Amino acid sequence: MNAKQFLEMLARLPARVWLQAILGLIGFVVLATLGFALIAGVAAVVLVVILAFKARQWLAGLFTGRPVREPPGRPDRKVIDVQYEIVDRRKDDVPR
């Protein structure tokens, strides 16, 4: 079946099939849009709740004078003293 035969077959379909296909496509687009909007809305609400919680903690710490809690330091840190030597591999007699 080539493209011309396929288009002729589509042209012979009754109007009821065309209307159902169009309504199905519109319904699919509407549901996809609403689904995306729902996901974006839930993400926005979660983000606002997290930001409100953090702002409340920050304001409470600001007005009560208590220091902000920080995560504890790692006890297993090792500081190693390292010396670096810069080696210039360019030749001085080569013009640039």
Image (tube, rainbow, N blue to C red):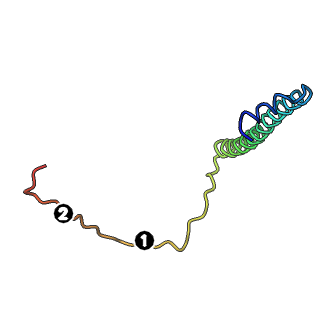
- Which residue corresponds to mark 1? 79
Q: Residues within 10 Å of mark 1 (few under 14, many from 20)?
A: few
Kindly identify the amino acid type of the residue bearing the numbered disc 1.
Val
Tell me the quarter of the picture where residue 16 sits: top right
**Relative vertical location of residue 53 with respect to residue 8 in this rendering, above or below:** below
Q: Residue at x 77, y 41 (%)?
A: 39
The answer to which of 72 and 45 lies nearer the viewer is 45
Q: Residue at x 79, y 33 (%)?
A: 29
Helix, strand, or loop for circle 1?
Answer: loop
* Marks 2 & 1, CB-CB < 8 Å contact: no
- Which residue corresponds to mark 2? 89
Kindly identify the amino acid type of the residue bearing the numbered disc 2.
Arg
Tell me how many marks there are. Answer: 2
| Relative to 23, 33 lies left or right | left
Disc nearer the start of the sequence (2/1): 1
The answer to which of 21 and 42 lies nearer the viewer is 21
Labelled disc at residue 55: none
**Relative vertical location of residue 52 with respect to residue 86 in this rendering, above or below:** above
| Relative to 80, 13 lies left or right | right
Q: Residue at x 42, y 71 (%)?
A: 79
The answer to which of 87 and 81 lies nearer the viewer is 87
| Image location of residue 67, percent across then percent down | 61, 52
Classify the position of the N terminus by image quarter. Answer: top right
**Relative vertical location of residue 68 with respect to residue 28 in this rendering, above or below:** below
| Image location of residue 74, percent across then percent down | 56, 69
Q: Residues within 10 Å of mark 2 (few under 14, many from 20)?
A: few
| Image location of residue 73, percent across then percent down | 56, 65
| Relative to 86, 18 lies left or right | right
Helix, strand, or loop for circle 2?
Answer: loop
Give me the C-alpha separation between circle 2 and circle 1. Answer: 30 Å
